Every structure is written in structure tokens, then in C-alpha cells.
């Protein structure tokens, strides 16, 4: 007769849920935007007048601008640097992330 | 003895107020933004995903971008055309106008 492993698996299941919850609670893209936060704010509301708010902005526009910074088509030293290693998929994720935030 | 001109001036004053009211009721810049409306919306909320919402955007950022389109520093065919004849004061007015609108 096999030993009853139910309590072990139940504990493992609960621990997994508890440990995974904080990760799942973060919206997609939050791990990518750490570099964006100092200028654009974690909530997409800029603390600097010359820096645009991104919260609630149209995602296709944001993606297009990210691509333009990435390739140098839109010239901006800091944004070129920040976007230099982003993949297309990561830019899509970042654009969708800021677009999903409530505007100020 | 001078004729009493009070009724005339009172009528003139009232007529001026009544005629001026509809003009004053429009926020500053509304006469300038007629060219912006088709793409950016009268309320600063774009109907096109690839066009940015301007409502509630930071005025210094908007002004900086208008200047960049005007000079060609930020390359955008349509925006270069739309901004070609704007004065610095008009660009300031437009930036302040869209910034003052409530975001979506």
C-alpha cells in the first residue's frame, strides 16, 4: 500500500499558489519597465513637464514610437539608449502596459 | 448742458458683452486647433490608434514636440506641414490648450 501523500501535495499546492500570487498580481510588462520608471513614472505619469505621460496613451502609437527610438528614426539620445536591446515582443509588451494604465 | 448719453453707452456695453460672450466662452487656442481636430480630436482624444491623445499631456512636452515638428527636428511629414506657419506664441497656446483638456 502506498503511503498517503495527499497532505504533502496539498501543502505544495498551497505554497505554490501563495508564492506565485505576488508574481501573478503584477501586470504583464512590469518587469520590463524598471528602466522607464525614473522618467515616465511607475504609473505612467511623468514627474517632469518635458517628459510625456504614457498612461492611457494609444498602444499602437507607443509601439510605433518605441520602434522609432530603437532604430533611431525618432532621434532621442536617452530613449535610443533605453530601447537599444528591446525585442519587438518586449516593445509590444511595454506599449500595452502603459496604454492599460489609467491616465491622470 | 450735455445730452444724457447713459442709455446709449449702457446699450453699447450690453451689446458688447452679449456679442463677446460666445467668443470668450471658447478656451484660448480653440480657433488655432481646427487643423489638429481631424487627427487628434476636438477633445484631444484621438480616433486613431497610431495618433497620440493630447488631452492632459504635459504642456512643456507638447510645446517641445511642436517646435521639433516646426523645425523638422522631429520628422513627421503631416505635422511638419501643419506646424509650418505657427508662431512660437501660437505653439504655446496650442500646447496649453490640449494640456488643459481632461484625459480620457
Image: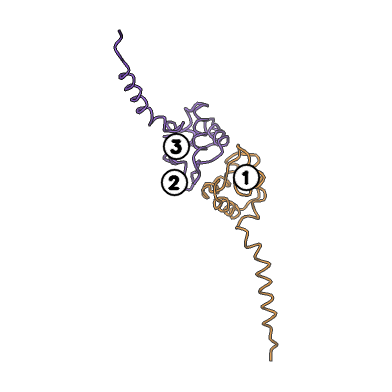
Chain colours: A purple, B orange
Badge 1: chain ID: B
Contact flag, marks 3 and 1 (Cβ < 8 Å): no
Contact flag, marks 2 and 1 (Cβ < 8 Å): no
Left or right of residue B33, residue A47 in this image: left
Q: Quadrant of residue B45?
A: top right
Residue at horizontal 35 percent and vertical 28 percent from the top: A18
Q: Helix, strand or loop at disc 1?
A: helix
The alpha-carbon separation of the residues under discs 2 and 1 comes to 24 Å
Residue A19's disc number: none
The alpha-carbon separation of the residues under discs 3 and 1 comes to 25 Å
Residue at horizontal 62 percent and vertical 63 percent from the top: B24
Residue beneath label 2, please?
A: A47
**Residue B37 horizontal/vertical position (percent):** 65, 47
Left or right of residue B70, residue B3 in this image: right
Residue at horizontal 65 percent and vertical 43 percent from the top: B39
> Which is nearer the eye, B19 or B70?
B19
> Which is nearer the eye, A25 or B81?
A25
Q: Earlier in the sequence, mark 3 or mark 2?
A: 3
The alpha-carbon separation of the residues under discs 3 and 2 comes to 12 Å
Residue beneath label 3, please?
A: A36
Quadrant in which the N terminus of chain A is drawn: top left
Residue beneath label 1, please?
A: B40
Relative to A14, residue B63 above or below? below
Q: Helix, strand or loop at disc 2?
A: loop
Amino acid at each position: 500500500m502506498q503511503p498517503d501523500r495527499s497532505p504533502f501535495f496539498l501543502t505544495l499546492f498551497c505554497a505554490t499558489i501563495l508564492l506565485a500570487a505576488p508574481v501573478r498580481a503584477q501586470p504583464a510588462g512590469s518587469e520590463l519597465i524598471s528602466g522607464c520608471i525614473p522618467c515616465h513614472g511607475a504609473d505612467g505619469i511623468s514627474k517632469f513637464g518635458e517628459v510625456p505621460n504614457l498612461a492611457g496613451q494609444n498602444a499602437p502609437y507607443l509601439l510605433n514610437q518605441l520602434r522609432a527610438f530603437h532604430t533611431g528614426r525618432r532621434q532621442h539620445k536617452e530613449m535610443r539608449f533605453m530601447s537599444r536591446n528591446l525585442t519587438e515582443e518586449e516593445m509590444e509588451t511595454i506599449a500595452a502596459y502603459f496604454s492599460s494604465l489609467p491616465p491622470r
